[in-house]
């Protein structure tokens, strides 16, 4: 049987909402149900053209061990809802997950409430520690802080680059062909590869990036051919669409990584950094080089 949620056993939770590149705003809720949408009747009203009147519902329950559990219910609307880059379905929502609607991002945050009785017990025990032992304990804390500063200072510098620094994902591809016939053939070949990658993006997020690169190569080869190539006449639109999809996914992942780091959730930070590496499969890309350096600091921290 579900337990009643009260302030005494479950801490309030936060919905952090922002537009891409904008400053996030925090909304704190204690009730078990929060309706999100553009309509006046919603608990969290988002005045954005990309939102429907009732976009999605977040529900909080309590597990058998007294822990908070969250669920999301998207509604059948014209404007789709995504969770961590995938189409949302009714199911579990985990703190740190990123909900996306158009260019608006909503992140769920929840921190476990500390046990007051346990805290008081620790205070009583610590009050009986001899002065000499307290001095030694203080020295250990100072030494630990120094080591943490040396390690996390380097990690923080890497974090700034991988989560907030501007990153240019795409550059004009270097293409070359000898004559109009070869250029047309290469255009069709790149177009076919791009479509294949786009269809397989669900299995490998790196295929989003690969499809955008190949579509742009197809467009460049078509220009060099000097022919209209009517069977791939939509290539310019596909270039823009594939680049946009990749950049949205990339920015969502960077946002999720920044929140994991801010919440000191090293496990989720590692997962998000790994996902970002898949999104940028080119290991020689300037951003990927910075990201790999940051990922190494995470690995070193686990040793």
Image (cartoon, rainbow, N blue to C red):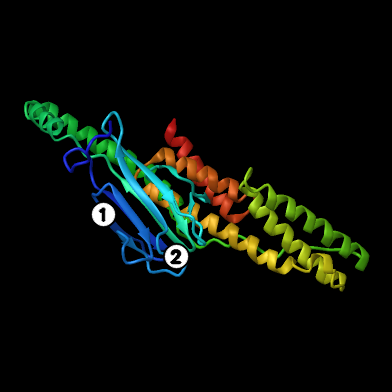
Q: Residue at x 85, y 68 (%)?
A: 229
The crowd level at tag 2 (other Cα within 10 Å; few <14, some 14-19, many 20+) is few
Q: Position of residue 87 (x, y in %)?
A: 53, 50
| For residue 95, side relative to residue 223 (left or right) | left
| For residue 9, side relative to residue 145 (left or right) | left
Mark 2 or mark 1, which is nearer the start of the sequence?
2
Residue under pointer 2: 21
Q: Quadrant of residue 177?
A: bottom right
Is label 2 in a helix, a strand or a loop? loop
CA distance for labels 1 and 2: 22 Å
Q: Position of residue 251 (x, y in %)?
A: 50, 57
| For residue 21, side relative to residue 171 (left or right) | left
Task: Count how many numbered circles sit on residues in the image.
Answer: 2
Above or below: residue 291 compared with residue 214:
above
| For residue 173, side relative to residue 139 (left or right) | right
Above or below: residue 226 compared with residue 266:
below
**Disc on res. 28:** 1
- Quadrant, the C terminus: top left
Residue 290 visible in the picture: yes
**Disc on res. 196:** none
Q: Position of residue 57 (x, y in %)?
A: 37, 52
Marks 1 & 2, CB-CB < 8 Å contact:
no
- Quadrant, the N terminus: top left
Q: Position of residue 214 (x, y in %)?
A: 73, 57
């Amino acid at each position: 049987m579900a337990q009643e949620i009260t302030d005494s056993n479950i801490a309030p939770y936060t919905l952090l909402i922002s537009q891409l590149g904008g400053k996030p705003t925090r909304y704190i809720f204690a009730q078990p149900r929060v309706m999100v949408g553009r309509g006046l009747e919603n608990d969290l009203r988002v005045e954005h053209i990309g939102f429907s009147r009732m976009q999605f519902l977040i529900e909080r329950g309590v597990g058998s061990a007294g822990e908070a559990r969250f669920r999301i219910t998207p509604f059948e609307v014209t404007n789709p809802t995504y969770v961590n880059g995938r189409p949302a379905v009714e199911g579990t929502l985990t703190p740190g997950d990123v909900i996306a609607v158009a260019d608006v991002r909503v992140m769920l945050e929840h921190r476990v409430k500390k046990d007051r009785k346990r805290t008081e017990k620790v205070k009583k025990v610590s009050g009986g520690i001899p002065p000499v032992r307290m001095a030694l304990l203080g020295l250990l804390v100072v030494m630990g802080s120094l080591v943490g500063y040396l390690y996390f200072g380097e990690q923080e510098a890497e974090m700034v680059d991988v989560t907030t620094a501007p990153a240019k994902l795409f550059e004009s591809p270097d293409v070359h062909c000898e004559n109009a016939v070869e250029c047309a053939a290469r255009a069709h070949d790149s177009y076919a590869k791009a479509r294949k990658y786009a269809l397989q993006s669900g299995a490998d997020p790196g295929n989003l990036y690969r499809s955008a690169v190949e579509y742009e190569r197809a467009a460049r080869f078509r220009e060099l051919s000097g022919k209209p190539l009517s069977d791939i006449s939509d290539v310019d639109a596909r270039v823009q669409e594939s680049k946009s999809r990749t950049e949205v996914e990339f920015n969502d992942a960077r946002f999720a990584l920044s929140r994991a780091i801010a919440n000191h959730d090293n496990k989720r930070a590692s997962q998000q950094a790994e996902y970002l590496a898949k999104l940028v499969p080119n290991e020689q890309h300037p951003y990927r080089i910075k990201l790999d350096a940051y990922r190494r600091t995470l690995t070193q921290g686990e040793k």
